[in-house]
């Protein structure tokens, strides 16, 4: 049966024949069509498609043969060879993700590329990118109802990928007169806050919540203003009870920073149990935690906090707002406590000093 299935069988169309083969993923057999023709004095044989998987017929195969003979089409083998030398966005992403795997944003970048860029532009040749392609991506993202900040992050990822490819000499740079990344303007001056009543409700829910690790983590965010990633990376060795400091290792700003271990944070951590993991708030298997969204969203809903309040980032704003409102902390001190690289980032809280 196997030898019979490989027998070449002709059709009524010149240069078109088929062999029988097992159907892909199903029982039974189907015809696999081939064409033969001469190019530059050499006889070329090319597979053009399967009877069911590609809906191929002898007539369609004959039309493809004509295109191949006239040079209007390339064989599958020629296409594979050509694509192997092309830098598509999908190929560039594989290179980019390998070289940027250590970045703290790599997990978010993977999601942004797979969800938003690959479906629309993955097969696009990088060297042929033009502004119209970027505009089309921006419109597509906006139609999905994504926030301007999210759209900007996705476009910035695309720009970073292209820039890395150019820097490494992987492909010819796109024509700058035909490609530009006009990033949407984003208002990052939002300062989230909670009223005394909302804060009391939030703390009450934390007292009652069954997940003590998450409750402690959220209290520490409120007491120190630490970022989510900084809390995830916090190890016991970073907490200096004797000198009264917390070391923030590998922060957003790049350089390690120290912040004071205030009385509330000290009391909280002295009661926090330490297990075998080096992390204060470990994930599965004692490894570094990577996500906490479900747990904090549950607490947020139970406390009745505003829908647009971002639980961990919002608590950092609450921490900063309370310090600024106290009148006892100047902008320079607040900048250092928040580990802001620039005083301009701290100025959003200046009005609270009044």
Image (spheres, rainbow, N blue to C red):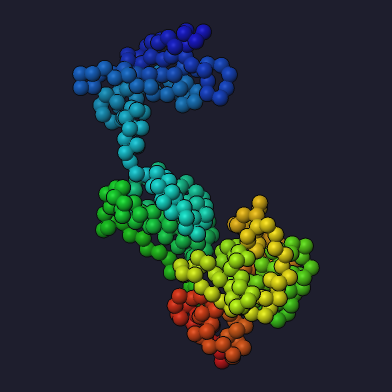
Residue found at x 41% / y 15%: 18
State the image coordinates of residue 311 (x, y, percent, origin top left).
Answer: 64, 68
Q: Is residue 190 left or right of residue 10?
A: right
State the image coordinates of residue 217 (x, y, percent, origin top left).
Answer: 66, 67
State the image coordinates of residue 347 (x, y, percent, origin top left).
Answer: 49, 82
Quick check: can you spot residue 134? no
Q: Residue furthest right?
A: 208
Q: In this view, does 19 lie to the left or right of 240?
A: left
Residue found at x 50% / y 51%: 110
Q: Which of 245 and 132 is in front in this view?
A: 245
Quick check: can you spot residue 264? yes
> Residue 246, relative to residue 136: is it above or below?
below
Quarter the C terminus occupies: bottom right
Q: Residue furthest left?
A: 41
Q: In this view, does 77 lie to the left or right of 303?
A: left
> Residue 120, relative to residue 250: is it above or below?
above
> Residue 156, relative to residue 326: is it above or below?
above
State the image coordinates of residue 38 (x, y, percent, origin top left).
Answer: 25, 19
Residue found at x 58% / y 62%: 233
Q: In which quarter of the image is residue 282?
A: bottom right
Q: In which quarter of the image is residue 80?
A: top left
Q: In this view, does 295 lie to the left or right of 95?
A: right
């Amino acid at each position: 049966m196997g030898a019979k299935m490989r027998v070449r069988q002709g059709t009524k169309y010149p240069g078109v024949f088929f062999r029988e083969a097992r159907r892909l993923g199903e029982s039974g057999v189907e015809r696999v069509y081939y064409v033969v023709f001469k190019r530059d004095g050499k006889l070329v044989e090319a597979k053009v498609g399967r009877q069911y998987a590609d809906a191929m017929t002898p007539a369609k195969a004959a039309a493809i043969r004509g295109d191949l003979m006239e040079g209007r089409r390339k064989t599958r083998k020629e296409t594979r060879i050509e694509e192997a030398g092309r830098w598509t966005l999908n190929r560039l992403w594989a290179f980019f993700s390998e070289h940027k795997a250590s970045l703290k944003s790599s997990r978010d970048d993977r999601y942004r590329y797979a969800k938003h860029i690959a479906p629309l532009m993955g097969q696009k040749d990088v060297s042929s990118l033009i502004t119209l392609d970027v505009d089309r991506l921006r419109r597509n993202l906006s139609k999905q109802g994504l926030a301007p900040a999210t759209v900007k992050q996705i476009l910035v990822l695309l720009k970073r990928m292209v820039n890395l490819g150019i820097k490494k000499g992987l492909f010819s740079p796109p024509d700058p007169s035909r490609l530009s990344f006009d990033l949407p303007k984003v208002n990052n001056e939002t300062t989230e806050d909670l009223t005394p009543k909302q804060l009391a409700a939030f703390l009450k829910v934390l007292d009652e919540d069954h997940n003590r690790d998450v409750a402690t983590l959220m209290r520490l965010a409120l007491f120190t203003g630490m970022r989510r990633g900084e809390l995830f990376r916090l190890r016991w060795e970073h907490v200096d009870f004797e000198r009264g400091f917390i070391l923030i290792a590998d922060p957003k700003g790049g350089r390690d920073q120290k912040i004071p271990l205030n009385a509330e944070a000290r009391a909280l951590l002295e009661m926090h149990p330490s297990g075998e993991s080096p992390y204060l708030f470990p994930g599965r298997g004692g490894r570094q935690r990577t996500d906490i969204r479900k747990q904090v969203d549950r607490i947020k809903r139970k406390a009745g906090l505003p829908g647009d309040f971002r639980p961990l980032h919002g608590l950092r704003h609450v921490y900063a707002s309370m310090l600024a409102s106290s009148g006892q902390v100047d902008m320079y001190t607040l900048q250092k406590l928040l580990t802001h690289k620039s005083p301009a980032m701290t100025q959003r809280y200046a009005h609270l000093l009044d």
